[in-house]
Amino acid sequence: MKEPRVCVQIDGIHGNAYASEALLPSAGVFQIMCPEGTAGGRVDGRVLILNPVSGSQSHVDTVVELGTEHDFDVRKTEKRGDAKRFARDAAPDAGLIAAGGGDGTVNKVVNGIAAANELETTTVAVVPAGTGNNFATNIGIQGINHAFRVIEEGRRRWIDLGTANDQIFVNSCVGGITAEASSKTESESKANLGVLAYVKSMLATMGSFDSLPLQVETASGSNGNRSQAWDGRAMFVLIGNCRRFTGARTAQANVEDGLLEVTIVEDAAAMNLLSDAALQRLLGRDSNYVVRRRAPSLVIESNRDAITYSLDGEILEAHSLRLETVPRTLQIAVGENYQSDPDTGIF
Ligand SMILES: Nc1ncnc2c1ncn2[C@@H]1O[C@H](COP(=O)(O)OP(=O)(O)OP(=O)(O)O)[C@@H](O)[C@H]1O
């Protein structure tokens, strides 16, 4: 719950402010304006930040209607950048902020709350209205109607966040898949193949892929893993916070263990990767081309040009990338089937 707030009038200007001693000496006329019973102002305000252009865009009316019914102040984004700004501005007053959109919208909302320094006091809910909705699936949210049931009745869990240089990611960070491939990937393919859809569209666009000369150093962790270095040419490097990279479209990782799932796909230029089956084998357990690690932090250095990374679908260019987990930092509404450890079935 947010700190108690009071509404004040200072020399005729009305507004909300924390009651602080620093404010009082310069306050001039100081008058409590709160009506009875609302001494906390919008202590537990609900804001829904809705991306109207995510996914098939057919969700807008339903989300606005349900959001309003469930007492959300619904704010539709109008351009890129709005989701983060809206979340940053709303976080000081809102106890619950819902992100209506895909993984990219969740990313922006969480980055906005972090920019306002309000992660500790703001719960996040996800109303899945994107294309892949991979993060929503991983936390047990099955659709728009289900999301609102979870908001009212569901459990809250504190989950880890990932950081890549100074930016937060919630679900995953993928390197080596270019911005061009991201924008050319069709929604249908993305919904069926997940991250492999980007691989496919990139191979189709370029015919081949110039692999990345990389050094990856993973730190030792509380899981007993030692610090390890990898040096070579990679097709992709995939870092999951809430996501594991397998041949399956979605695979939830433990997002409460303070560890990142690192998957390096080694240069496999000789393979014919254009069929879906070949792509799925590429990330399968028996693949010869995959190096897997689990670590609380890692550093990826390019031995050549800057690399294009996708943080939950949002693009970041970096020559050197430091990734870390911030354990149990975000409180999130999860579905009834969500299990923190998908391998042991622990709830
Ligand atoms: N009104 C808007 N106009 C244009 N772009 C927007 C608008 N609102 C948000 N965006 C952009 O949309 C992107 C987020 O899309 P999002 O990831 O939510 O959907 P998606 O790609 O369909 O779903 P998923 O990531 O689950 O596959 C962000 O880059 C954000 O800046």
Image (cartoon, rainbow, N blue to C red):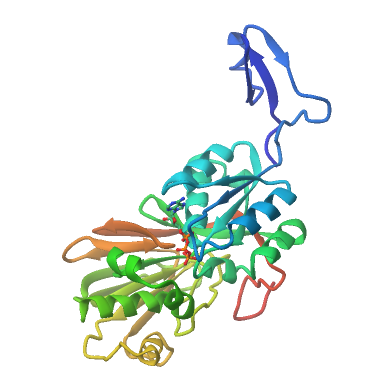
Q: At 63% from the left edge and 44% from the top edge, which residue is drawn?
A: 121
The x and y percentages for residue 336 are: 72, 70
- Residue 194 is left or right of residue 146, and the answer is left
Judging depth in this view, the residue of 59 and 165 nearest the camera is 59
Which of the 4 image quarters holds residue 230? bottom left
Left or right placement of residue 311 versus residue 23 in this view? left
Q: In the picture shown, does residue 83 fall above or below 27?
A: below
Q: Nearer the viewer, residue 225 or 31?
A: 31
Rendered-image quadrant of the N terminus: top right
Ligand 1 shows up in which quadrant of the image?
A: bottom left
Residue reaching furthest top? Answer: 28
Q: How many marks?
A: 0
At x 28%, y 75%, the residue is: 202
Q: Position of residue 99 (x, y in %)?
A: 57, 54
Q: Quadrant of residue 226?
A: bottom left
* 62 versus 270 height, above or below: above
Query: Residue 301: image x %, image y %?
Result: 25, 63
Rendered position, 332 above or below 6: below
Residue 176 visible in the current orientation:
yes
Q: Is residue 117 above or below residue 216?
A: above
Judging depth in this view, the residue of 167 and 150 nearest the camera is: 150
Residue 328 can be seen, yes or no? no
Q: Is residue 319 left or right of residue 56?
A: left
Q: Quadrant of the C terminus?
A: bottom right
